Each structure stands twice: as C-alpha cells, then as structure tokens.
Image (tube, rainbow, N blue to C red):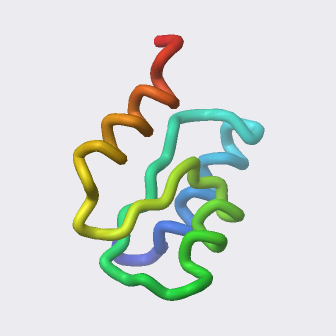
Amino acid sequence: MPHINGYETAKKIRELQNGKGPVIFAVSAGDMNDEEERSLKAGMDKYFTKPISRTALKESLFYFFKNG
C-alpha cells in the first residue's frame, strides 16, 4: 500500500463498516512493545509476529470463523 499503512487501512475499513466488517489479522516481522496494542486499537482483530505458528493461526481462524 503505497500511500496508507495497515493501521490507517484498518481504521478506514472499520469506519466504513460502522465498527464491523471483515476479520483483520495483523502480521508483522517486528516485535516492538506497542505494535500489538496499536494494531488492536486501529481495529484489527488479532496480531501475529512472524513466523506464525500453524497452531496459533488455526486457533484464531476457528475462533473468528466458527459460526460461519
């Protein structure tokens, strides 16, 4: 995304969807202390650091999509 970052994108999606909308996962190679908090405040549903464990991904997918 050349002109907008992931935090801004998630905020815009949530604004357009009145706080609802698609499930948004943040995936980052960084491990800064505030990245997870910033991601969740921006409207993302889950934060992962790379490499993502298969178990964590499966559990999160099941949690967010179990009713679908």
Check the image and name the residue furthest to the front.
55
Residue at 65% across / 54% down in the picture?
43
Q: Can you give x and y, in whole percent of width and height, for residue 15 in the image?
A: 72, 48
Relative to residue 52, is residue 2 depicted above or below? below
Quarter placement of the N terminus: bottom left
Check the image and name the residue furthest to the bottom.
32
Relative to residue 19, is residue 63 depicted above or below? above
Relative to residue 40, is residue 68 depicted above or below? above
Residue at 57% across / 48% down in the picture?
45
Instruction: Tell whether 54 sits left or right of 34.
Output: left
Check the image and name the residue furthest to the right.
18
Q: Which of 55 and 3 is in front in this view?
A: 55
Instruction: Tell whether 63 sits left or right of 19.
Output: left
**Residue 55, quarter of picture:** top left
Check the image and name the residue furthest to the top.
68
Numbered disc total:
0
Instruction: Tell whether 15 sits left or right of 39.
Output: right
**Residue 18, quarter of picture:** top right
Instruction: Tell whether 61 sits left or right of 66.
Output: left
Q: Can you give x and y, in whole percent of width and height, for residue 57 in the image?
A: 33, 44
Relative to residue 61, is residue 10 depicted above or below? below
Q: Nearer the viewer, residue 20 or 4?
A: 20
Residue at 53% across / 61% down in the picture?
9
Q: Can you give x and y, in whole percent of width and height, for residue 17 in the image?
A: 68, 37
Q: Which of 42 and 8 is in front in this view?
A: 42
Residue at 59% across / 48% down in the picture?
13
Q: Which of 9 and 34 is in front in this view?
A: 34
